[in-house]
Image (cartoon, coloured by chain):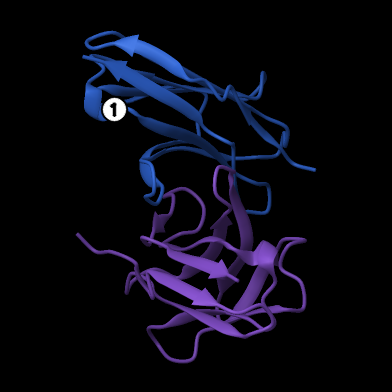
Chain colours: A purple, B blue
Amino acid sequence: EPEVTQTPSHQVTQMGQEVILRCVPISNHLYFYWYRQILGQKVEFLVSFYNNEISEKSEIFDDQFSVERPDGSNFTLKIRSTKLEDSAMYFCASSRDGFREGYTFGSGTRLTVV
Amino acid sequence: QKEVEQNSGPLSVPEGAIASLNCTYSDRGSQSFFWYRQYSGKSPELIMSIYSNGDKEDGRFTAQLNKASQYVSLLIRDSQPSDSATYLCAVNTAGGFKTIFGAGTRLFVKA
């Protein structure tokens, strides 16, 4: 069964450092997403990406966040200057039609900011 | 602010019983609705999607949608201990470029 791959599974970083979270979506999917889940809280939308540009972003996705699809397979989330409150599980997801079929999620990257 | 509301639970049912999970949403323009299952420490996994009023069945799972009442539900028949997880209701908002998740209902199935 096709899957969304995320690396690393766990990253520890110092406050103020930049981190890049990496994702390989399912190959025939066209819509890509980043979500985060703070421990014990709900899954929160960060950003959607289609046709090589951001489709929609949440209030959380401020200037410290950026996304990129540098080649035909990878999809990355960069956090420029991490804060303690950025500690969370970050999920990448992809979808073939972005509307009716639902999303396939990766296994997540647990980001710990110290 | 577009919201998806769920009872946080926990909902406890005996093995073999029917578990009933409910969800309401605020965006009347929403068109697609989903149920995901999330085991502790794992990522959400899609169980079912529904976009027409009425019932949709898939194995032991039945999703129900009532757009007039802005209400979605999930029935799990013959509940098994392996069904113990958090069930997330999710709504694709009008415009279609994002899906909003509820906080989830924790389900415990007692053997």
**Residue found farthest to the bottom:** A71
The answer to whether any part of residue A104 appears in the image is yes
Is the N terminus of chain B in the top left, top right, bottom left or bottom right quadrant?
top right
Residue displayed at 65% across by 40% down: B30
The mark total stands at: 1
Q: Please provide percent x and percent y for residue A95.
A: 43, 61
Residue B41 relative to residue A77: left or right: left
Task: Count residues near mark 1 (Cα–Cα under 10 Å), then give few for <14, some for 14-19, many for 20+.
Answer: some
Q: Is residue A85 above or below residue B84?
A: below
In percent of the image, x 51 and y 68: which residue is there? Answer: A111
Q: Vertically, is A67 above or below B81?
A: below
Q: Amino acid at mark 1?
A: Asp
Residue designated by label 1: B83
Q: Chain of mark 1?
A: B
Looking at the picture, does residue A50 appear above or below residue A80?
above
Q: Nearer the viewer, residue B6 or B57?
A: B6
Q: Position of residue A82 (x, y in %)?
A: 67, 76
Q: Position of residue A38 (x, y in %)?
A: 58, 52
Position of B30 with respect to A37 (left or right) is right
Specify the quadrant that holds the C terminus of chain B: top left
* Quarter of image, res A106: bottom left
Residue B66 appears anywhere in the view: no
